[in-house]
Amino acid sequence: MTDKIAVVTGASTGLGYQLARFAAEDGYSLIICADEEKIHEAADKLRRLGAEVEPMVVDLATRHGVDSFWQAIADREIDLFFANAGRALGEAFHDQDWAAIKRRIDLNLLQTTSLLHRVGRKMHARGSGRILVTGSIGGFVPGPYDAVYNATKAYLDSFCYALQDEWKDGPVTLTCLMPGPTETEVFDRPENDLADAPIAESQKDDPVEVARAGYDAMMRGERGVVPGVTSKILTMLAGVVPQSILARVHRAGAKPE
Ligand SMILES: NC(=O)c1ccc[n+]([C@@H]2O[C@H](COP(=O)([O-])OP(=O)(O)OC[C@H]3O[C@@H](n4cnc5c(N)ncnc54)[C@H](OP(=O)(O)O)[C@@H]3O)[C@@H](O)[C@H]2O)c1
């Protein structure tokens, strides 16, 4: 491994893969993980860019998975950490399976917080490091038919802004990437239950551009980035429009047809 190490969670597909690619192109060695074996295909593609890559299959929705991942990275000098792994969950709340709801909370919120606690401590002890968290503009908007998912992202967005204030005079930067709907595998995964939502068929942002905006903002040490004009307008409106109206707007794109 080279001197510079980037760790990316959820790097097998979508935004995480693109974030890993940008780090590889910048000369970082990579430690990447995902829940399924497909992470090895991503590792092979990233190696073709000349990067050293250590892929791991770990379930970051569980304490056990986070502990094993941490064991593999705890002794390394981590320069960049991308807390990106996350899963959506469509359909009406009362129709969702409790085990699926709990897994979203565990992955998006509980275990991501646990990882950030460990990484944040480690980087502060070392005196340097950059962190990018993939939040969402969904965190600004109540999400009928994505209620739990949006709530987990509201937690993450808020958590990031709080940590940025705590860490503002310190050696560690934390950037929150808050994408709007982006063309990734998230809409195709059957377990996410998004296939029947109108948003699945509508035009979405380009994952390369979204990840690029996040990566560049992280490297500049910025607090947050909302890629895309429509998403920027939505987040501005979210500060003034009543929650009930925001919920109605979200419902239009999320209620299964
Ligand atoms: N696409 C959008 O519209 C959008 C908008 C706002 C925010 N986001 C956020 O962006 C992040 C990346 O999502 P994406 O759109 O790129 O979707 P994606 O292509 O489905 O990628 C999700 C990644 O997370 C991994 N992952 C899921 N569950 C995991 C688990 N239990 N343990 C370890 N890894 C796990 C997946 O790997 P496996 O397949 O191996 O499980 C995959 O690598 C997520 O946090 C998502 O909430 C996406």
Image (tube, rainbow, N blue to C red):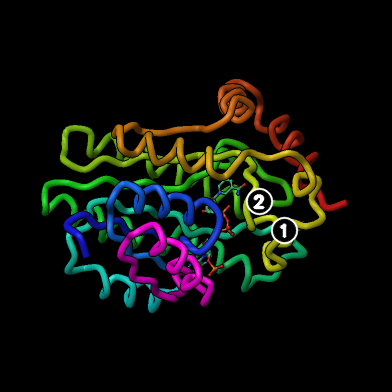
Compared across the picture, whether 5 is left or right of 97 comes to left
For marks 2 and 1 on the same chain, the one whose residue lies earlier in the sequence: 1
Does 29 sit above or below residue 161?
Answer: below
User: Could you give the CA–CA distance between mark 2 and mark 1, rounded to whole angstroms?
Assistant: 7 Å
Residue 112 visible within the image: no
Name the amino acid type tagged 2: Ala
Residue appearing at x 78%, y 57% in the figure: 195
Residue 251 or 135: which is nearer the viewer? 135
Does 62 sit above or below residue 48?
Answer: below
Residue 138 visible within the image: yes
Q: Is mark 2 within 8 Å of ligand 1?
A: no
Badge number at residue 93? 1
The quarter of the picture where residue 242 lies is top right
Residue marked by disc 2: 147
Q: Is residue 41 magenta?
A: yes
Residue 2 or 70: which is nearer the viewer? 2
Residue appearing at x 35%, y 53% in the figure: 24
Report x, y in % for residue 48: 41, 62
Does 24 sit above or below residue 38?
Answer: above
Q: Quadrant of ligand 1?
A: bottom right
